[in-house]
Amino acid sequence: MKVLRDSYDRHFTYLRLSLTEKCNFKCTYCLPNGYQSNSCASDLDLHEIKNLLLAFKKLGFTKLRLTGGEPTLRKDIIEIVELAKNLGFATIALTTNGFRLLNLLEPLQRAGLMMLWLKLRTSTETETKSRSQKLYQKAKMSESKDDCFTFHSETSCNLNI
Ligand code: SF4
């Protein structure tokens, strides 16, 4: 099998794929004025994503992280995760601001999602603090049973689901 290696002979296995540049948040360091469409370029469709994932799988990639923008704004996000699972990716993760997770978490898990990277920073510091604290409390409660949350900073954590 052909694999991707760099000049130090390191084999790449981890793909980060941006599904959209759209986002519903206005983080000051990223989209302070909110998302503004300034090009006629559209997101990759499901067929194009399948072709890309197949190509990277053939090159030995086993881990996938879906990112954006905000990837959960895509109507076909469940199908994309399902597709990655059916193609045999060993780890499927999603970076998200968490806004749509309440409705999407269960279907995403059923489709094959294994890990979430939550970005908790929002437009105002107060809001960010409040979201972080809520999640942190939840994490603390679950930590005794299951070490599923890892906090990287006050505003970023990953969660094995
Ligand atoms: S949630 Fe992420 S993509 Fe959206 S504005 Fe904030 S940093 Fe940017």
Image: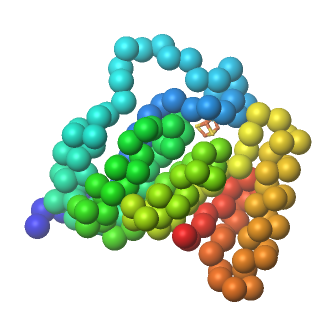
Residue visible at 74% across and 85% down in the picture: 144
Q: Quadrant of the C terminus?
A: bottom right
Question: In which quarter of the view is residue 43 placed?
Answer: top left
Classify residue 12 as left or right of residue 67: left
Spot the residue most to the bottom: 145
Q: Residue at x 47, y 64 (%)?
A: 109
Left or right position of 23 against 1? right
- Asked whether residue 80 appears in the rendered view, the answer is yes
Which of the pair 23/78 is nearer the observer?
Answer: 78
Instruction: Give how far across and how far down residue 115 sits, in percent.
Output: 51, 65
Colour setting: rainbow
Q: Nearer the viewer, residue 92 or 99?
A: 99
- 135 above or below 42? below
Give percent across and percent down for residue 143.
Answer: 72, 80
Pick the quarter of the image with the N terminus. bottom left
> Compared with residue 37, is residue 143 higher up or lower down, i.e. above or below?
below
**Can the viewer see residue 68?**
no
Residue 91 on image: x %, y %: 39, 67
